Image (cartoon, rainbow, N blue to C red):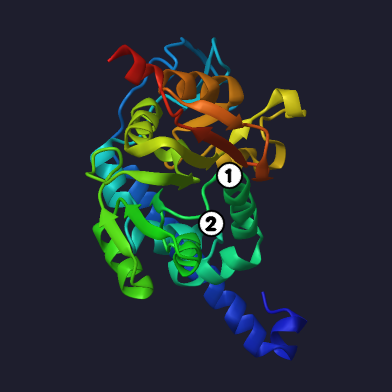
Amino acid sequence: MIRLEHVLHPGRSAWSLCRRAKLSLYRLLAANQVRRMRREQRISCSCGGELLPFKRHRSYGVCVNCGCYVNRYPPCLHDLKRFYSLDRYWGRWMQLKGAPTIEFRTANDLKDGRIDCWFSLLQRFGPPTGRVIEVGCGHAAFLGELSRRGYDCIGVEIGQDVSEWTRRHTALRIIPGAFPDVELPECDIFLAFDVLEHVHDPAAFLQKAHAILKPGGTAILQQPTIRPEQGYVLDPPLGEDFERMFDDVEHLWIFTNANLRILAKSSGFQILDDQSRWRQCHEILVLRRPVESRWERNS
């Protein structure tokens, strides 16, 4: 059906048609990609709690102990490593979700306030100098800012092609590999922004973070966290962000503070802040490795 606007604005109509055609193609490619992913099965939470059915999304269960939402059928690690590539995740997947692709993310992140938020946290809780390791650094916008301020910066990125792209565009040291299964030096600051919800084993992740942090070192993590104590009592959970966050390809965990406190304590960390956030679905957890940890006292 030809509308008047198509006649009056042929250029705009052609651009809109092209955009819709591209979006349909991205959806088709993404659907095929997701359909081929092999799935595992998870029967308990990271805290050991039993999972109850979640009526709003059959892929997730709810932990009876800590209230964490757990992806019961996560993609296997091998397929996730392939998924987080330059063309699949940072290209087609971002375009499908209407998010900036990797080449536009630095400008986006400098503009939307997240980097200012992270800087303020680092000034409050971290040392003014030292070595920084950021896991899941992606385009490494924040690491680049820290490097310009004199920090010794190392990034970790799961995809070989992504790590090479970032190294080429930033001249930073970027190590390819899936954390925690990657060799890293000691650091003073450990960072992971919007990463923990993607990993298969958050307990192992935090244990390795503790191991590479120097005594007194600081870890700053950002991940979707439902906080009933801050009024996060919504139905569905996370309200208008529910569909975006309960994505059973990307997100293996939707945390609660109760779950994160269990993980932090079992990994030997002291919690400095579990109330801050950049914005909803991007809640902050700041941890410190004690100067004398209980692991050292027992050794």
Q: Nearer the viewer, residue 5 or 270?
A: 270
Residue located 26% across and 46% down the image: 184
Amino acid at dot 1? Arg
Vertical order, 68 against 143 (above or below): above
Could you tell me which quadrant the N terminus lies in?
bottom right
- Evaluate whether residue 58 shows in this view: no
Quadrant in the picture for residue 140: bottom left
- Residue 47 in the image: state x and y as whole percent: 45, 16
**Within 10 Å of the Cα at label 2, are there few (<14), some (14-19), or many (20+) other Cα atoms?**
few
Vertical order, 197 against 268 (above or below): below
Could you tell me which quadrant the C terminus lies in?
top left
Q: Is residue 179 left or right of residue 256?
A: left
Tag of residue 132? none
Q: Nearer the viewer, residue 6 or 255?
A: 255
- Residue 283 in the image: state x and y as whole percent: 62, 39
- Residue 186 in the image: state x and y as whole percent: 31, 43
Residue located 61% across and 76% down the image: 16
Which element type, helix, strand or loop, lies under badge 2?
A: helix
Residue located 54% across and 31% down the image: 254
- Evaluate whether residue 296 shows in this view: yes
Please report whichever mark, 2 or 1, sits nearer to the chain's N-terminal start: 2
- Residue 256 in the image: state x and y as whole percent: 59, 25
Q: Is residue 267 left or right of residue 121?
A: left
**Within 10 Å of the Cα at label 1, are there few (<14), some (14-19), or many (20+) other Cα atoms?**
few
Residue topped by disc 2: 97
Which element type, helix, strand or loop, lies under badge 1?
A: helix
Amino acid at dot 2? Lys
Asked if marks 2 and 1 touch (Cβ < 8 Å), the reply is yes
Vertical order, 11 against 144 (above or below): below
Give the alpha-carbon distance from disc 2 to disc 1, as whole Å.
9 Å
Residue located 46% across and 26% down the image: 269
Residue topped by disc 1: 244
